[in-house]
Image: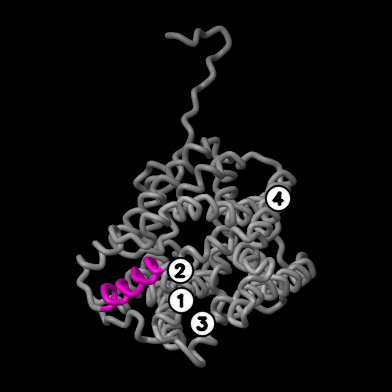
Amino acid sequence: MKKRNHAIDGLRGFSLSGIIVANMLIFQYGLFGETVPELFGIKGADLAFHSFLFIAVVGSFMPIFAFLFGFGMVKLADSLKARELRPKSHLARRFLLLFIFGMLHATFLWEGDILTFYGATGFFLLLFLNRKPKTLLVWSVLLLALTGALGASPMESSVKGLGQSEHTESYILQSRDVYGTGTYAEIKDFRNNADPFGEEEGWIMAIAIVLAPLMIAPMFLLGMRAAKVGTFDDPVAMRRTYARRAAIFVSIGLLTKSFSVLGPQFGGGALPGIGIGETLGGSLLALGYIYAFMLLYAGSRRVALLERFEAVGRLSLTNYLLQSLICTTVFYGYGLGLFGRAGVFDGTLIVLTVYAAQLWLSLLYLKRFRNGPVEKVLRIWTYLSWKGRPRKPVRVAEPLEGESRVS
Protein backbone atom coordinates (compact mmCIF):
# COMPACT_ATOMS: atom_id res chain seq x y z
CA MET A 1 0.00 0.00 0.00
CA LYS A 2 1.41 3.38 -1.03
CA LYS A 3 2.08 6.02 1.58
CA ARG A 4 -0.17 9.05 1.57
CA ASN A 5 1.41 12.13 0.00
CA HIS A 6 1.26 14.61 2.88
CA ALA A 7 2.63 17.42 0.71
CA ILE A 8 -0.43 17.20 -1.57
CA ASP A 9 -2.74 17.23 1.46
CA GLY A 10 -0.90 20.31 2.73
CA LEU A 11 -1.16 22.06 -0.63
CA ARG A 12 -4.88 21.30 -0.79
CA GLY A 13 -5.37 22.72 2.70
CA PHE A 14 -3.31 25.81 1.86
CA SER A 15 -5.39 26.43 -1.26
CA LEU A 16 -8.54 26.60 0.87
CA SER A 17 -7.09 29.64 2.69
CA GLY A 18 -6.96 31.58 -0.57
CA ILE A 19 -10.28 30.18 -1.77
CA ILE A 20 -12.17 31.44 1.27
CA VAL A 21 -10.58 34.90 0.93
CA ALA A 22 -11.46 35.09 -2.77
CA ASN A 23 -14.96 33.77 -2.06
CA MET A 24 -15.41 36.42 0.63
CA LEU A 25 -15.91 38.97 -2.14
CA ILE A 26 -18.80 36.88 -3.48
CA PHE A 27 -20.19 36.13 -0.02
CA GLN A 28 -20.24 39.87 0.69
CA TYR A 29 -20.90 41.48 -2.71
CA GLY A 30 -22.38 38.74 -4.87
CA LEU A 31 -21.11 36.92 -7.94
CA PHE A 32 -21.58 39.99 -10.13
CA GLY A 33 -21.06 42.67 -7.51
CA GLU A 34 -17.49 41.69 -6.54
CA THR A 35 -16.07 43.45 -9.62
CA VAL A 36 -17.93 46.75 -9.15
CA PRO A 37 -16.83 48.05 -5.72
CA GLU A 38 -18.17 51.54 -6.46
CA LEU A 39 -21.75 50.25 -6.17
CA PHE A 40 -21.02 49.36 -2.54
CA GLY A 41 -19.23 52.58 -1.65
CA ILE A 42 -15.79 50.94 -1.43
CA LYS A 43 -13.04 53.55 -1.61
CA GLY A 44 -9.69 54.59 -0.18
CA ALA A 45 -7.61 51.92 1.54
CA ASP A 46 -10.39 49.37 1.19
CA LEU A 47 -10.45 49.90 -2.59
CA ALA A 48 -6.66 49.45 -2.72
CA PHE A 49 -6.98 46.22 -0.75
CA HIS A 50 -9.75 45.12 -3.14
CA SER A 51 -7.31 45.56 -6.03
CA PHE A 52 -4.62 43.68 -4.12
CA LEU A 53 -6.95 40.70 -3.65
CA PHE A 54 -7.76 40.62 -7.35
CA ILE A 55 -4.06 40.60 -8.16
CA ALA A 56 -2.73 38.17 -5.55
CA VAL A 57 -5.70 35.96 -4.63
CA VAL A 58 -8.80 36.01 -6.86
CA GLY A 59 -8.47 33.58 -9.75
CA SER A 60 -5.20 32.10 -8.47
CA PHE A 61 -6.24 29.68 -5.73
CA MET A 62 -9.17 27.92 -7.36
CA PRO A 63 -6.84 26.82 -10.20
CA ILE A 64 -4.67 25.13 -7.53
CA PHE A 65 -7.74 23.09 -6.60
CA ALA A 66 -8.20 22.21 -10.29
CA PHE A 67 -4.55 21.12 -10.50
CA LEU A 68 -5.01 18.89 -7.45
CA PHE A 69 -8.26 17.52 -8.86
CA GLY A 70 -6.39 16.27 -11.94
CA PHE A 71 -3.53 15.00 -9.77
CA GLY A 72 -5.86 13.09 -7.46
CA MET A 73 -7.77 11.64 -10.39
CA VAL A 74 -4.65 9.96 -11.77
CA LYS A 75 -3.52 8.72 -8.33
CA LEU A 76 -6.94 7.20 -7.65
CA ALA A 77 -6.95 5.55 -11.07
CA ASP A 78 -3.50 4.06 -10.39
CA SER A 79 -4.69 2.72 -7.04
CA LEU A 80 -7.73 1.11 -8.64
CA LYS A 81 -5.63 -0.45 -11.40
CA ALA A 82 -3.31 -1.94 -8.79
CA ARG A 83 -6.36 -3.60 -7.23
CA GLU A 84 -7.48 -4.85 -10.65
CA LEU A 85 -10.58 -2.65 -10.55
CA ARG A 86 -11.99 -0.47 -13.32
CA PRO A 87 -10.85 3.15 -12.83
CA LYS A 88 -13.23 4.87 -15.24
CA SER A 89 -16.41 3.41 -13.75
CA HIS A 90 -15.33 4.37 -10.21
CA LEU A 91 -14.27 7.85 -11.30
CA ALA A 92 -17.52 8.36 -13.23
CA ARG A 93 -19.54 7.58 -10.10
CA ARG A 94 -17.35 9.97 -8.11
CA PHE A 95 -17.84 12.78 -10.62
CA LEU A 96 -21.59 12.21 -10.74
CA LEU A 97 -21.92 12.61 -6.97
CA LEU A 98 -19.68 15.71 -7.02
CA PHE A 99 -22.01 17.16 -9.64
CA ILE A 100 -25.05 16.40 -7.47
CA PHE A 101 -23.37 17.90 -4.39
CA GLY A 102 -22.65 21.00 -6.45
CA MET A 103 -26.22 21.34 -7.69
CA LEU A 104 -27.54 21.09 -4.13
CA HIS A 105 -24.91 23.54 -2.89
CA ALA A 106 -25.72 26.09 -5.60
CA THR A 107 -29.49 25.72 -5.30
CA PHE A 108 -29.91 25.77 -1.54
CA LEU A 109 -26.88 27.65 -0.21
CA TRP A 110 -24.58 29.73 -2.40
CA GLU A 111 -24.22 30.96 -5.97
CA GLY A 112 -20.42 30.60 -6.17
CA ASP A 113 -20.34 26.78 -6.22
CA ILE A 114 -17.53 25.05 -8.15
CA LEU A 115 -18.36 21.40 -7.43
CA THR A 116 -20.89 21.25 -10.27
CA PHE A 117 -18.23 22.46 -12.70
CA TYR A 118 -15.62 20.06 -11.35
CA GLY A 119 -17.99 17.12 -11.50
CA ALA A 120 -18.94 17.86 -15.11
CA THR A 121 -15.32 18.48 -16.11
CA GLY A 122 -14.29 15.15 -14.61
CA PHE A 123 -16.21 13.27 -17.31
CA PHE A 124 -14.32 15.21 -19.98
CA LEU A 125 -10.99 14.47 -18.29
CA LEU A 126 -11.64 10.73 -18.58
CA LEU A 127 -10.65 11.15 -22.23
CA PHE A 128 -7.13 12.06 -21.06
CA LEU A 129 -6.77 9.51 -18.28
CA ASN A 130 -4.57 7.11 -20.23
CA ARG A 131 -2.68 9.71 -22.25
CA LYS A 132 1.09 10.05 -22.01
CA PRO A 133 2.61 12.91 -19.97
CA LYS A 134 3.92 14.53 -23.17
CA THR A 135 0.42 14.58 -24.65
CA LEU A 136 -0.97 16.20 -21.50
CA LEU A 137 1.78 18.83 -21.59
CA VAL A 138 1.19 19.66 -25.26
CA TRP A 139 -2.55 20.07 -24.72
CA SER A 140 -1.92 22.22 -21.61
CA VAL A 141 0.46 24.55 -23.44
CA LEU A 142 -1.88 24.86 -26.42
CA LEU A 143 -4.85 25.70 -24.20
CA LEU A 144 -2.80 28.19 -22.16
CA ALA A 145 -1.72 29.89 -25.39
CA LEU A 146 -5.34 30.00 -26.57
CA THR A 147 -6.59 31.54 -23.32
CA GLY A 148 -3.76 34.07 -23.49
CA ALA A 149 -4.84 34.99 -27.00
CA LEU A 150 -8.42 35.43 -25.80
CA GLY A 151 -7.22 37.81 -23.11
CA ALA A 152 -5.36 39.84 -25.71
CA SER A 153 -8.35 40.05 -28.05
CA PRO A 154 -10.90 42.91 -28.17
CA MET A 155 -13.72 40.37 -27.82
CA GLU A 156 -12.71 39.54 -24.24
CA SER A 157 -12.95 43.20 -23.22
CA SER A 158 -16.34 43.57 -24.87
CA VAL A 159 -17.70 40.52 -23.06
CA LYS A 160 -16.58 42.01 -19.74
CA GLY A 161 -18.30 45.25 -20.65
CA LEU A 162 -21.57 43.47 -21.30
CA GLY A 163 -21.65 42.33 -17.70
CA GLN A 164 -21.67 45.98 -16.60
CA SER A 165 -24.88 47.01 -18.35
CA GLU A 166 -27.72 48.95 -16.72
CA HIS A 167 -29.66 45.72 -16.30
CA THR A 168 -26.76 44.05 -14.51
CA GLU A 169 -26.21 47.12 -12.33
CA SER A 170 -29.89 47.05 -11.36
CA TYR A 171 -29.54 43.35 -10.54
CA ILE A 172 -26.53 44.04 -8.29
CA LEU A 173 -28.32 46.83 -6.42
CA GLN A 174 -31.32 44.58 -5.92
CA SER A 175 -29.09 41.76 -4.69
CA ARG A 176 -27.59 44.15 -2.14
CA ASP A 177 -31.01 44.58 -0.56
CA VAL A 178 -32.14 40.96 -0.87
CA TYR A 179 -28.96 39.33 0.41
CA GLY A 180 -28.46 41.91 3.13
CA THR A 181 -31.93 41.84 4.66
CA GLY A 182 -33.86 38.96 3.08
CA THR A 183 -35.04 35.73 4.63
CA TYR A 184 -33.60 32.39 3.56
CA ALA A 185 -36.59 31.78 1.25
CA GLU A 186 -36.30 35.25 -0.35
CA ILE A 187 -32.55 34.87 -0.95
CA LYS A 188 -32.96 31.37 -2.38
CA ASP A 189 -35.70 32.55 -4.74
CA PHE A 190 -33.63 35.53 -5.92
CA ARG A 191 -30.49 33.41 -6.42
CA ASN A 192 -32.28 30.80 -8.51
CA ASN A 193 -34.68 32.97 -10.50
CA ALA A 194 -33.43 36.56 -10.91
CA ASP A 195 -31.79 37.30 -14.28
CA PRO A 196 -28.51 39.26 -14.08
CA PHE A 197 -28.29 39.89 -17.84
CA GLY A 198 -31.68 40.48 -19.41
CA GLU A 199 -32.94 39.38 -22.82
CA GLU A 200 -30.41 41.36 -24.88
CA GLU A 201 -27.42 39.87 -23.09
CA GLY A 202 -28.70 36.37 -22.44
CA TRP A 203 -26.07 34.93 -24.76
CA ILE A 204 -23.29 36.09 -22.42
CA MET A 205 -23.97 33.08 -20.19
CA ALA A 206 -23.41 30.77 -23.15
CA ILE A 207 -20.04 32.44 -23.79
CA ALA A 208 -19.09 32.11 -20.11
CA ILE A 209 -20.01 28.40 -20.13
CA VAL A 210 -17.70 27.86 -23.12
CA LEU A 211 -14.78 30.00 -21.91
CA ALA A 212 -14.67 28.89 -18.25
CA PRO A 213 -13.67 25.25 -18.95
CA LEU A 214 -11.22 26.44 -21.60
CA MET A 215 -9.38 28.71 -19.16
CA ILE A 216 -9.17 26.18 -16.32
CA ALA A 217 -8.63 22.98 -18.36
CA PRO A 218 -4.81 23.41 -18.54
CA MET A 219 -4.58 23.23 -14.74
CA PHE A 220 -6.51 19.95 -14.64
CA LEU A 221 -4.23 18.49 -17.32
CA LEU A 222 -1.03 19.77 -15.70
CA GLY A 223 -2.12 18.17 -12.43
CA MET A 224 -2.67 14.87 -14.23
CA ARG A 225 0.79 15.14 -15.80
CA ALA A 226 2.42 15.95 -12.44
CA ALA A 227 0.94 12.75 -10.99
CA LYS A 228 2.20 10.67 -13.91
CA VAL A 229 5.78 11.98 -13.89
CA GLY A 230 6.16 12.12 -10.08
CA THR A 231 6.72 15.87 -9.75
CA PHE A 232 5.97 15.78 -6.02
CA ASP A 233 7.27 12.34 -5.11
CA ASP A 234 10.63 13.65 -3.80
CA PRO A 235 10.46 17.36 -2.83
CA VAL A 236 14.03 17.39 -1.50
CA ALA A 237 15.45 16.27 -4.84
CA MET A 238 13.23 18.76 -6.68
CA ARG A 239 14.11 21.76 -4.51
CA ARG A 240 15.98 23.71 -7.20
CA THR A 241 13.33 22.94 -9.79
CA TYR A 242 10.57 24.16 -7.45
CA ALA A 243 12.50 27.35 -6.66
CA ARG A 244 13.17 28.14 -10.32
CA ARG A 245 9.57 27.48 -11.40
CA ALA A 246 8.15 29.42 -8.45
CA ALA A 247 10.25 32.48 -9.30
CA ILE A 248 9.26 32.39 -12.98
CA PHE A 249 5.54 31.75 -12.60
CA VAL A 250 4.97 34.05 -9.60
CA SER A 251 6.73 36.92 -11.40
CA ILE A 252 4.85 36.50 -14.69
CA GLY A 253 1.54 35.88 -12.93
CA LEU A 254 1.78 38.97 -10.75
CA LEU A 255 2.88 41.17 -13.65
CA THR A 256 0.07 40.09 -15.98
CA LYS A 257 -2.59 40.28 -13.28
CA SER A 258 -1.37 43.69 -12.09
CA PHE A 259 -1.59 44.93 -15.67
CA SER A 260 -5.18 43.70 -16.01
CA VAL A 261 -6.36 44.99 -12.61
CA LEU A 262 -4.54 48.33 -12.43
CA GLY A 263 -4.60 49.23 -16.13
CA PRO A 264 -8.32 50.12 -16.28
CA GLN A 265 -8.01 52.13 -13.03
CA PHE A 266 -5.48 54.41 -14.71
CA GLY A 267 -7.41 54.85 -17.94
CA GLY A 268 -5.90 51.91 -19.82
CA GLY A 269 -9.02 49.83 -20.24
CA ALA A 270 -8.60 49.77 -24.02
CA LEU A 271 -4.93 48.75 -24.01
CA PRO A 272 -4.04 45.65 -26.08
CA GLY A 273 -3.91 42.52 -23.95
CA ILE A 274 -5.58 44.14 -20.94
CA GLY A 275 -7.53 40.93 -20.27
CA ILE A 276 -4.55 38.58 -20.33
CA GLY A 277 -4.14 38.68 -16.57
CA GLU A 278 -7.67 37.40 -16.09
CA THR A 279 -7.52 34.65 -18.70
CA LEU A 280 -3.90 33.51 -18.30
CA GLY A 281 -2.27 35.28 -15.36
CA GLY A 282 -4.37 33.55 -12.73
CA SER A 283 -3.26 30.07 -13.83
CA LEU A 284 0.40 31.09 -14.09
CA LEU A 285 0.36 32.60 -10.62
CA ALA A 286 -1.35 29.46 -9.31
CA LEU A 287 1.52 27.37 -10.68
CA GLY A 288 3.95 29.71 -8.94
CA TYR A 289 2.10 29.31 -5.65
CA ILE A 290 2.13 25.51 -6.03
CA TYR A 291 5.90 25.31 -6.47
CA ALA A 292 6.56 27.94 -3.79
CA PHE A 293 4.48 26.00 -1.27
CA MET A 294 6.23 22.74 -2.13
CA LEU A 295 9.53 24.35 -1.12
CA LEU A 296 8.27 24.05 2.47
CA TYR A 297 8.56 20.27 2.07
CA ALA A 298 11.95 20.46 0.38
CA GLY A 299 13.86 21.81 3.36
CA SER A 300 15.56 19.93 6.17
CA ARG A 301 13.22 21.34 8.83
CA ARG A 302 9.47 20.81 8.87
CA VAL A 303 7.29 23.87 9.45
CA ALA A 304 4.91 23.23 12.37
CA LEU A 305 1.89 24.69 10.56
CA LEU A 306 2.13 22.13 7.76
CA GLU A 307 0.42 19.43 9.84
CA ARG A 308 -2.62 21.67 10.21
CA PHE A 309 -2.68 22.48 6.48
CA GLU A 310 -2.59 18.74 5.83
CA ALA A 311 -5.53 18.14 8.17
CA VAL A 312 -7.61 20.80 6.41
CA GLY A 313 -6.63 19.27 3.07
CA ARG A 314 -7.68 15.77 4.07
CA LEU A 315 -11.12 17.20 4.89
CA SER A 316 -11.13 19.58 1.92
CA LEU A 317 -14.63 18.85 0.63
CA THR A 318 -16.21 19.05 4.08
CA ASN A 319 -14.26 22.22 4.89
CA TYR A 320 -15.19 23.83 1.57
CA LEU A 321 -18.90 23.27 2.17
CA LEU A 322 -18.56 24.40 5.80
CA GLN A 323 -17.00 27.65 4.60
CA SER A 324 -20.11 28.29 2.51
CA LEU A 325 -22.46 27.43 5.36
CA ILE A 326 -20.67 29.63 7.91
CA CYS A 327 -19.95 32.59 5.64
CA THR A 328 -23.44 32.82 4.13
CA THR A 329 -24.77 32.85 7.70
CA VAL A 330 -22.37 35.66 8.58
CA PHE A 331 -23.07 37.82 5.53
CA TYR A 332 -26.69 37.05 4.54
CA GLY A 333 -29.82 38.61 5.98
CA TYR A 334 -31.00 35.47 7.77
CA GLY A 335 -27.72 35.54 9.76
CA LEU A 336 -25.66 38.54 10.82
CA GLY A 337 -26.61 40.50 7.70
CA LEU A 338 -23.13 41.88 6.94
CA PHE A 339 -23.62 41.66 3.17
CA GLY A 340 -21.97 44.73 1.60
CA ARG A 341 -21.35 46.27 5.02
CA ALA A 342 -18.25 44.70 6.57
CA GLY A 343 -15.79 46.10 4.02
CA VAL A 344 -13.07 44.29 2.11
CA PHE A 345 -10.34 44.29 4.76
CA ASP A 346 -12.62 43.47 7.68
CA GLY A 347 -14.38 40.84 5.58
CA THR A 348 -11.01 39.22 4.93
CA LEU A 349 -10.28 39.13 8.66
CA ILE A 350 -13.66 37.49 9.28
CA VAL A 351 -13.13 34.67 6.78
CA LEU A 352 -9.53 34.11 7.86
CA THR A 353 -10.86 33.64 11.38
CA VAL A 354 -13.16 30.94 10.01
CA TYR A 355 -10.19 29.33 8.26
CA ALA A 356 -8.07 29.52 11.42
CA ALA A 357 -10.82 27.62 13.25
CA GLN A 358 -10.70 24.96 10.54
CA LEU A 359 -6.92 24.66 10.97
CA TRP A 360 -7.46 23.91 14.65
CA LEU A 361 -10.59 21.77 14.47
CA SER A 362 -9.57 19.65 11.47
CA LEU A 363 -6.54 18.27 13.29
CA LEU A 364 -8.66 17.47 16.36
CA TYR A 365 -11.27 15.76 14.18
CA LEU A 366 -8.71 13.51 12.46
CA LYS A 367 -7.42 12.27 15.79
CA ARG A 368 -10.77 10.48 16.21
CA PHE A 369 -12.02 9.88 12.66
CA ARG A 370 -10.38 8.69 9.47
CA ASN A 371 -12.48 10.66 6.94
CA GLY A 372 -14.68 13.74 6.91
CA PRO A 373 -18.45 13.17 6.71
CA VAL A 374 -18.80 14.39 3.11
CA GLU A 375 -15.64 12.54 2.06
CA LYS A 376 -17.06 9.38 3.64
CA VAL A 377 -20.27 9.61 1.62
CA LEU A 378 -18.23 10.20 -1.54
CA ARG A 379 -16.08 7.13 -0.83
CA ILE A 380 -19.13 4.94 -0.11
CA TRP A 381 -20.69 5.92 -3.44
CA THR A 382 -17.41 5.69 -5.40
CA TYR A 383 -16.64 2.17 -4.21
CA LEU A 384 -20.25 1.04 -3.65
CA SER A 385 -19.16 -0.17 -0.24
CA TRP A 386 -20.50 0.84 3.18
CA LYS A 387 -16.94 0.73 4.48
CA GLY A 388 -15.88 3.28 1.90
CA ARG A 389 -13.08 1.06 0.66
CA PRO A 390 -12.38 -0.56 -2.72
CA ARG A 391 -13.93 -3.99 -3.12
CA LYS A 392 -11.58 -6.87 -3.74
CA PRO A 393 -11.86 -8.12 -7.32
CA VAL A 394 -13.75 -11.35 -7.78
CA ARG A 395 -11.41 -14.03 -9.01
CA VAL A 396 -12.63 -17.06 -10.94
CA ALA A 397 -10.55 -20.12 -10.14
CA GLU A 398 -8.90 -21.72 -13.14
CA PRO A 399 -10.05 -25.34 -13.67
CA LEU A 400 -7.55 -28.08 -13.08
CA GLU A 401 -6.11 -29.85 -16.05
CA GLY A 402 -8.66 -32.23 -17.44
CA GLU A 403 -11.61 -30.55 -15.71
CA SER A 404 -14.45 -28.92 -17.61
CA ARG A 405 -15.27 -25.24 -17.02
CA VAL A 406 -18.98 -26.14 -16.98
CA SER A 407 -20.13 -28.45 -14.23
Mark 1 or mark 3: name the one nearer the start of the chain.
1
Q: Are marks 3 and 2 in contact (CB under 8 Å)?
A: no
Q: Secondary structure at mark 1?
A: loop
Foreground mark, 1 or 3, reads 1
Mark on residue 36?
1
Say which residue label 4 marks: 142
Q: Is residue 88 left or right of residue 361?
A: right
Q: Residue at x 37, y 66 (%)?
A: 167
**Alpha carbons under labels 4 and 3: distance apart:** 32 Å
Overall secondary structure of the magenta stretch? helix
- On the image, the x and y values in percent for residue 28 come to 38, 77
- The amino acid type of the residue labelled 2 equals Gln
| Figure check: 279 above or below 28 | above
Foreground mark, 4 or 1, reads 1
Q: Residue at x 40, y 55 (%)?
A: 200
Say which residue label 2 marks: 164
- The amino acid type of the residue labelled 1 equals Val
Mark 3 or mark 2: name the one nearer the start of the chain.
3
- The amino acid type of the residue labelled 4 equals Leu
Q: Identify which residue, 38 or 316, lies in the foreground.
A: 38
Residue 176: say if magenta.
yes
Q: Secondary structure at mark 3?
A: helix
Residue 343: say if magenta.
no
In magenta, the rendered stretch is 166-180
Disc tally is 4
- On the image, the x and y values in percent for residue 256 come to 68, 71
User: Label 1 crowding class (10 Å Cα cut-off): few <14, some 14-19, many 20+?
Assistant: some
Foreground mark, 3 or 2, reads 2
Q: Are marks 1 and 2 in contact (CB under 8 Å)?
A: yes
Say which residue label 3 marks: 50
- On the image, the x and y values in percent for residue 308 come to 50, 75
